[in-house]
Amino acid sequence: MKKNLLLFVASVLSFLFIIACSEKKNVNQVVTPQAENSVESCVSCHTDYELLKTVYTPDPPVVGGGGCGGDAPHIEPYDRVFMGGDGYTLFKNSTHGRLGCVSCHNGDGSSSEKGVAHSGNFIAKPSHKASEKCGACHASIVNGATNSLHEQGWGQKSMVVLRSGLDNVPTGFDQLSAQMKDGYEHNCASCHASCGDCHVNRPHAGGGGLYKGHSFQKTPDMRDHCTTCHVSRGGHAYFGVAIGTVPDVHLTKAGFTCMNCHNKNEIHGDGNIYDQRYKMPLKPECDDCHSNVATANPFHTKHIDTFSCNVCHSQDYNNCGSCHVGAEGARIASHQKFKIGMNPLTETKAKYKFALLRESPMAPDSWDNYGTPILSNFDVRPTYKYTTPHNIIKITTRTGYKDLTTGNWVVFSNCTEGCHISKNSDDTFKNKELYLFDEDLLNWEKAASQGVIVDGKLPSSWGL
């Protein structure tokens, strides 16, 4: 009897031990035996640099432009898929690393032959199927990002759609011709990112491929991720690249990265479609940090509802162009300048009468190489857009001057000196170059941009 009781207790304890191990595996997301076995062939190839150099597939010829930042740097295919270094060590010991390669990439993990391993439903970039591959663990993020500006580029799509004479996104984009969609994919979509482009890979604009041996980056690197894509205006301005400019004060004085202002909820999205980035309710605003702006000084008190903040606090900035759509690119070369015009965003930025503007790259014939010689409704939007350059400094040439003796910046005593237009003794006009007039427009821009030029809309006391 005693012996039977001991056997019974031992059986119960064994059963409970098995259950406990099983539960522990589930909690810690330990991979299944199938994934443990299958990972060996994947890892044995992708950690063998010399082998990758013998079995890689060369890149196809480049089609279309390089996108906003020009052509991406070339990284060899075998370098893009090599898993090594400290980054790979971090990855293989992480939760994602323990899932097993086929859990995310599918394919046949039991074969060391490339064609077989990458056969069937193999997915090179699992986040291209984010709902299936990322959503099981990151459901709220995936649900929000599905329609995000960051992933879908609705603002760009909206411009193409509306200028093509169609209704706005998303339905209008679906109605574009196959050629137009192909042009968009090859030119405009190259910088819009899925999960992996920020958290696992280098962005396409940076050459693509695994970043730091496949390790997952919870917070994307500002230089290697954010400004690799946002380079022509964001990084170019923030780091003070252009001659005559200095880095943004938020970098030099506060050491801010992009994520200090653009939080993850804004970037991931809230699941809604916004056809313009300034409509995103989670976007940062200056007064999120700078309180009591309206009463900070007499200039603010006078003009807080007249000029957007960047009118006074931005330096000259890059107006992009010459790198979009078609063999010749846009019809406007990339250039530095500074133009104040009438606020084109009367709904989303309604408080301002005047705003800083940038010249957009799209022209009526930009899509000629994709079956559309002339955009049928090009004039529906101005060619100069509301802009917020990331090159903020406290004192600019609109608010002060540099004392050549001391090298220090001195604030003007009044607005007239740096920003208001006044007549010189030789009948020329001081500060006129700061504003967007009809005479500044190219012929094909005039009809589209009448609403943002300042002709007839400036104070009569300025003497124009």
Image: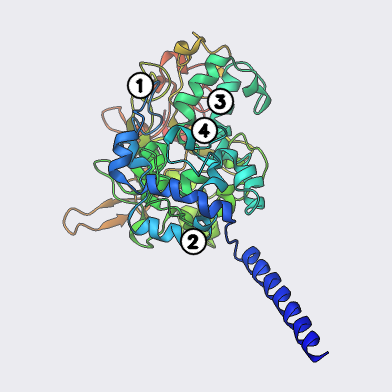
Q: Which mark is residue 159?
A: 3
Sequence-earlier tag: 1 or 2? 1
Instruction: Give the Cα distance between marks 1 and 4.
Output: 23 Å
Q: Residue 94 carries which label?
A: 2
Q: Residue at x 30, y 28 (%)?
A: 428
Amino acid on which disc 2 is placed: Ser
Sequence-earlier tag: 1 or 3? 1
According to the picture, the residue beneath numbered tag 1 turns out to be 61
Amino acid on which disc 3 is placed: Met
Q: Which residue is drawn at 53% across and 50% down?
A: 304
Q: Which of marks 1 and 2 is in front?
A: 2
**Image coords of residue 354 (percent x, y):** 51, 38
Q: Which of marks 3 and 4 is in front?
A: 4
Quadrant of the frame with the N terminus: bottom right
Amino acid on which disc 4 is placed: Ser
Residue 389 visible, this orientation? yes
According to the picture, the residue beneath numbered tag 4 turns out to be 119
